[in-house]
Image (spheres, helix red, strand yellow):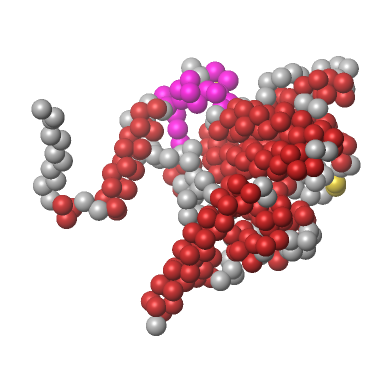
């Protein structure tokens, strides 16, 4: 005889999405307090999760410093000595999770997208250049997932990983900008190689006699060049969703599919968004986009919809079919949200 499982709710009216969300928040708060050995309810519950948490500046004494926190800068946990103040650490950890983790995932996702494209090109053309490119991508893509995303970013705030992300963020234009001055492309790649090697724990670029041969053994120039390209595409589709998408051409050229960089930015953004529900790449929901009609940014889906005939030329058949389905869903939801907003304003 099969057991009967019955869920009894005494007052169904008391249960709602809002109450469920609040309950989850309480569970999370208790878990965070447990992790950090905090039993004082006056202390901030999410000091490592958001810039906007005003209580994050609350003073923490050494009784609340644990070995877990020691991983992000505590020199001597028993004494509570730190290389940075705890307020600074809270800010760095928040920035790491809000910016760097997303950038790391974006690079890895874009590398996977490029790998699919070059494999298709090789199958179509059988050219030696496509084969060589695929060899580089095949080695760089696991680096993006394992070292950059998993080890340096998703694993949590850590000095070497954070520093690599900082160097990467300085290379939006394709060249590293330090104090307002652009470095040559070669020096930019070298800086990224060294930061990557430190972040992935592969070696020490500061040792005497360190040079290009050492870098090539651990992270070849061509692979780092490709990872930088993937980062630029990642930043590109995020830039579309900002309040001023008209600034986009400054770094990427005209916003037309004849511009291959722009086409790849849109396609890579949609590729990432396929696994992110009804949210557009860059954090812009289709509802926001529909209601504001692009004034607060534009989702890559809209560009894909307007250039679908041209877009298909860039994609293998299986990926084109999947993107078409995703595009139809996103555009349909945007239309429904727009209609709902117009009705409510009547």
Task: Tell me: 58 left or right of 324.
Answer: left
Is residue 246 visible in the rendered image? The answer is yes
Queried whether the magenta region covers residue 63, the answer comes back as yes
Q: Quadrant of residue 101?
A: top right
Against 164, residue 230 (above or below) is: below
Q: Is residue 269 above or below residue 168?
A: below
Q: Name the quarter where the C terminus is drawn.
A: bottom left
User: Count of labels shown?
Assistant: 0
Q: Nearer the viewer, residue 164 or 329?
A: 329
Extreme bottom residue here?
346
Residue 103, compared with residue 323, is above or below; it is above
Q: Measured from the top left, where is residue 315 in percent x and y?
A: 68, 50
Measured as percent of width and height from the top left, residue 250 is found at 78, 60
Q: Quadrant of residue 221?
A: top right
Give the camera-side residue of 265 and 179: 265
Q: Tell me, yes or no, if residue 285 can be seen here.
A: no
Q: Which residues are magenta?
A: 59-76
For image coordinates 76% across by 39% down, the residue present is 122
Please give the name of the residue rendered at 80% of the width and 46% of the height, measured from the top-left corner.
174
What is the quadrant of residue 26 in the picture?
A: top left
- Which residue sits at x=36%, y=37%? 28
Q: Is residue 120 magenta?
A: no
Image quadrant where one finds the N terminus: top left
Report the residue at 83% width, 24% height from top. Answer: 216
- Left or right of residue 149: residue 328: left
Q: Between 59 and 167, which is closer to the camera in this rendering?
A: 167
Closer to the camera in the image, 313 or 151: 313
Question: Residue 51: where, in percent of width, then height?
Answer: 52, 47
């Amino acid at each position: 005889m099969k057991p009967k499982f019955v869920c009894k709710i005494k007052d169904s009216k008391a249960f709602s999405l809002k109450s469920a969300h609040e309950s989850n928040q309480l569970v999370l708060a208790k878990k965070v307090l447990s992790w950090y050995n905090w039993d004082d309810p006056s202390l901030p519950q999410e000091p490592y999760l958001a810039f906007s948490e005003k209580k994050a500046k609350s003073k923490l004494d050494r009784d609340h410093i644990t070995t877990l926190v020691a991983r992000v800068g505590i020199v001597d946990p028993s004494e509570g000595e730190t290389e940075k103040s705890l307020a600074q650490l809270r800010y760095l950890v928040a920035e790491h999770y809000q910016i760097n983790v997303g950038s790391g995932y974006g690079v890895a996702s874009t590398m996977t997208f490029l790998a699919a494209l070059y494999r298709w090109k090789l199958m179509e053309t059988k050219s030696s250049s496509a084969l060589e490119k695929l060899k580089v991508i095949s080695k760089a893509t696991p680096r993006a997932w394992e070292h950059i995303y998993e080890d340096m970013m998703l694993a949590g705030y850590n000095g070497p990983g954070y520093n690599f992300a900082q160097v990467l963020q300085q290379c939006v234009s394709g060249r590293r900008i330090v104090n307002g001055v652009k470095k040559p492309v070669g020096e930019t790649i070298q800086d990224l190689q060294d930061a990557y090697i430190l972040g992935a724990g592969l070696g020490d670029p500061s040792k005497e006699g360190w040079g290009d041969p050492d870098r090539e053994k651990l992270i070849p120039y061509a692979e780092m060049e490709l990872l930088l390209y993937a980062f630029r595409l990642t930043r590109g589709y995020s830039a579309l969703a900002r309040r001023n998408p008209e600034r986009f051409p400054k770094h990427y050229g005209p916003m037309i599919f004849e511009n291959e960089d722009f086409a790849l930015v849109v396609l890579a953004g949609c590729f990432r968004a396929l696994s992110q529900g009804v949210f557009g790449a860059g954090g812009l929901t289709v509802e926001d986009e529909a209601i504001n009609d692009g004034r607060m940014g534009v989702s890559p889906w809209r560009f894909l919809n307007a250039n679908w005939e041209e877009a298909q030329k860039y994609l293998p058949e299986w990926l084109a079919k999947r993107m078409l389905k995703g595009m139809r869903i996103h555009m349909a939801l945007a239309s429904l949200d727009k209609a709902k907003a117009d009705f409510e304003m009547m």
